[in-house]
């Protein structure tokens, strides 16, 4: 059995070149109108590094969507594919043989105009294609709710999550305590940044967790996300952080309820650790 051959490292320039190659292939493919780069290969190229992938939209003539979703000659013409699958009705994920990874969607002009997406970069456009495709017609959805709303969401996530932990539903608890409640903490950090006039801090409009280590380095993320068997300390870290920064929005009765559950979960975790030590 032969071992897989290593491929050259993915570099920012190779990613940009690949996208340009895809644009050239589309230019020779009937039905294609434009290629739009998104994210780090779009308008945020300052973020492009060796861990980036290709995110793009292919804009096509009316009725041409199936041809570009089902026949991948225009994509394989840029470089051989190792894997591809349809992950949505209008999009695919693909891995090239040389390690470049791509996620893309295919839209008609009308469908693109009805979609919400961040500002894009025109990589290629057919001369008769409409101008301004890179500018979204619809605003991106925002995570609704003011500071008081986010605080209450975070603490009720803790409340329900800790009850599930005590019931033995550890995974469900971990998601509520270390994912959903932490998402509310990230939104609170965004709201604070917006109040300071620091708009546009979010790296990815659809994923609040992207780039938070750089955007909010003071967040105690390691304490709030310590792992599957540490929901007690995780909940305590989230509660302490929220209470310290947003005390005026923390309901005292809700805080007491969460504190009592944290103590119960930490007691159970300590007992589990003691049993594991005795049995080892």
Image: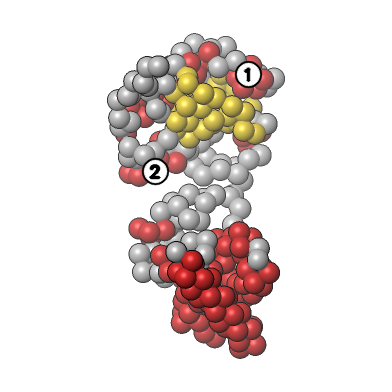
| SS under mark 2 | loop
Number of numbered discs on residues: 2
In the rendered image, the quadrant that contains the N terminus is top left
Residue 261 in the image: state x and y as whole percent.
Answer: 61, 79
At 50% from the left and 56% from the top, the residue drawn is: 208
Residue 149 placement: quadrant:
bottom right
Residue 204 in the image: state x and y as whole percent.
Answer: 48, 49
| SS under mark 1 | helix
Residue 189 in the image: state x and y as whole percent.
Answer: 46, 67
In the rendered image, the quadrant that contains the C terminus is bottom left
Q: Which residue is mark 2?
A: 44
Label 1: how many residues lie within 10 Å, few (<14), some (14-19) or many (20+)?
few
Residue 92 in the image: state x and y as whole percent.
Answer: 58, 29
At 68% from the left and 69% from the top, the residue drawn is: 167
Mark before the other along the chain sequence, 2 or 1: 2
Left or right: 66, with 57 as reference point: right
Q: Is residue 54 visible?
A: yes
Residue 243's tag is none
Vertical placement of residue 118 versus 106, above or below: below
Q: How is the image coloured?
A: secondary structure
Vertical placement of residue 251 versus 182, above or below: below
Q: Is residue 184 visible?
A: no
At 48% from the left and 79% from the top, the residue drawn is: 240
Vertical placement of residue 30 versus 239, above or below: above
Marks 2, 1: nearer the viewer: 1
Q: Residue furthest front?
A: 279
At 51% from the left and 27% from the top, the residue drawn is: 94
Label 2: how many residues lie within 10 Å, few (<14), some (14-19) or many (20+)?
some
Answer yes or no: do the residues labelled 2 and 1 have beta carbons within 8 Å? no
Q: Which residue is mark 1?
A: 70
What is the spatial separation of the Cα atoms under label 2 and label 1, in whole angstroms?
29 Å
Q: Nearer the viewer, residue 21 or 182?
A: 182
């Amino acid at each position: 059995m032969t071992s897989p051959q290593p491929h050259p490292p993915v570099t920012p320039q190779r990613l940009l070149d690949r996208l340009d190659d895809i644009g050239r292939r589309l230019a020779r493919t009937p039905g294609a109108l434009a290629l739009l780069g998104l994210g780090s290969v779009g308008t945020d190229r300052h973020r492009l590094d060796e861990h980036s992938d290709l995110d793009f939209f292919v804009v096509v003539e009316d009725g041409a969507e199936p041809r570009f979703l089902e026949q991948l000659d225009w994509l394989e013409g840029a470089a051989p594919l190792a894997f591809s699958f349809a992950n949505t009705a209008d999009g695919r994920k693909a891995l090239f043989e040389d390690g470049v990874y791509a996620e893309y969607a295919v839209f008609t002009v009308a469908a693109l105009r009805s979609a919400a997406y961040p500002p894009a970069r025109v990589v290629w456009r057919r001369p008769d294609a409409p101008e301004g495709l890179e500018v979204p017609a619809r605003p991106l959805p925002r995570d609704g709710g003011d500071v008081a709303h986010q605080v209450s969401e975070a603490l009720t996530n803790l409340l329900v999550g800790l009850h599930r932990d005590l019931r033995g539903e550890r995974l469900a608890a971990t998601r509520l305590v270390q994912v959903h409640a932490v998402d509310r903490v990230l939104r609170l950090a965004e709201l604070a940044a917006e109040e300071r006039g620091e708009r546009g801090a979010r790296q990815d409009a659809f994923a609040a967790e992207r780039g938070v280590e750089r955007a909010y380095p003071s967040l105690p993320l390691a304490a709030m996300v310590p792992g599957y068997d540490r929901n007690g300390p995780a909940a305590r870290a989230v509660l302490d952080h929220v209470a310290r920064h947003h005390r005026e929005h923390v309901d005292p009765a809700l805080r007491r309820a969460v504190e009592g559950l944290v103590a119960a979960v930490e007691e159970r975790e300590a007992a589990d650790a003691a049993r594991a030590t005795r049995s080892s």
